[in-house]
Image (spheres, rainbow, N blue to C red):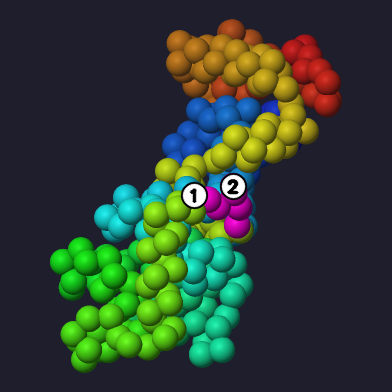
Amino acid sequence: MYIEGLGYVDENIYNAYNVSNATKASTNPVTQSVGQSVFDQLLEQEKANQVQEEKTVDLDSIFKEASDKYGISVDLLKSVAKAESNFNPEATSHCGAMGIMQLMPSTAQSLGVKDAYDPYENIMGGAKLLSQLDKMYDGNVKLMLAGYNAGPGNVEKYNGVPPFEETQNYVATIMRYLDEGVDTAGKTVNVSAENVSDSDNALTKAALDGLQDKLDDYFSYAEYQMLMTYFDTMMNIISSIGDTDGNSFASDNGDDSLSDLFRLGNIQYNRNNINLL
C-alpha cells in the first residue's frame, strides 16, 4: 500500500503500527511500538470497566477508612451499624431511613450522600454525622447516640438523652455492643467502584489477573518482549541513518529511506508465534 510520506509499505506492518487511532503518538507514529499500543489500550479499557462496575469489598475496610477520615472509632461505627440495620445495606425503616447506617433522605442529602443504599457512601455519611455530633457534645458518646437516634433538637429539649423508650433502648444497646465488641464476620458488600478510595480504586490483584488473561489473548509476555526488541532495533536504525527519501524506495545509488526500513522485515503473527522474517 502507498502511504504519503512513506511510499510503498507492507500493509500488515502499517496496520500493526496503527492498532488504534486513540493510542497514536502525537508525534511521528513510527515512534510508538505496536506491543505497547495494545497494552495501553487494554489497560485503559480495564480502568474504564473498573470505574463502571461494582466492586466487592469487606465491611471492615470501609469502617476503617471512615474511622480514619472522620475520627470516630471503628468499634462505635460497627456498633451503630449493627443496631441500625445489622449490616444490611438494603434495609429500609418504616419511616424511610436507608441502608446500613439508616440515614433519613434529608439527612443523607445534607451529608452529600448521593446513593444511601451504596454501603460505602452510607457508612461514610453515618461517620460524618457522628463526627458532627461528637463535636457538638464534646465526645459524650451517649449524647452522640441520642442525637443520632432522636435528633439534636430533642437532646437539647430534654437536656440529655430523651425519655423516649426507643432512644433509651437504642443508647443502652449500643453501649452494650461497645463493651462486648462487634464482629462483622468478614461480611462483604458490593459498592460502586467510583465511590471506593483512591488506594482501593487501583487495579486489584483479581483485576490484574483478568487483565493478564486478556493480554494473553493477543500475545504472551515473551512475544511482547520479542516485538519490543524488534522495533527498538528499527528505531535505532531510523535514528542513525535518518529518512533521506520518504517518498520512494532506495535508489540505485544506495540511499536509504524510511520505506526501505519497512521492507526490511515482515511480522508473521499468530496466537502462538511471532516470526521475524
Around disc 2, counting alpha carbons within 10 Å, would you say few (fewer than 14), some (14 to 19), or many (20 or more)? few
The answer to whether residue 145 of the structure is visible from this angle is yes
Around disc 1, counting alpha carbons within 10 Å, would you say few (fewer than 14), some (14 to 19), or many (20 or more)? some
Under circle 2, the secondary element is loop
Q: Which residues are magenta?
A: 183-189
Q: Amino acid at mark 1?
A: Asp
- CA gap between label 1 and label 2 equals 7 Å
Assess whether mark 2 and mark 1 are in contact (beta carbons under 8 angstroms). Answer: yes
Q: Amino acid at mark 2?
A: Gly
Farthest residue to the top: give it. 254
Sequence-wise first label, 1 or 2: 1
Q: Give the residue displayed 60% in from the left and 13% down from the top.
A: 229
Q: Give the residue displayed 57% in from the left and 22% down from the top.
A: 258
The one nearer the camera, 205 or 52, is: 205
Q: Is 235 on the left or on the right of 187, as rendered?
A: left
Q: Is 268 on the left or on the right of 28, as rendered?
A: right
- Disc 2 designates what residue? 186
> Residue 159: x and y, percent?
18, 85
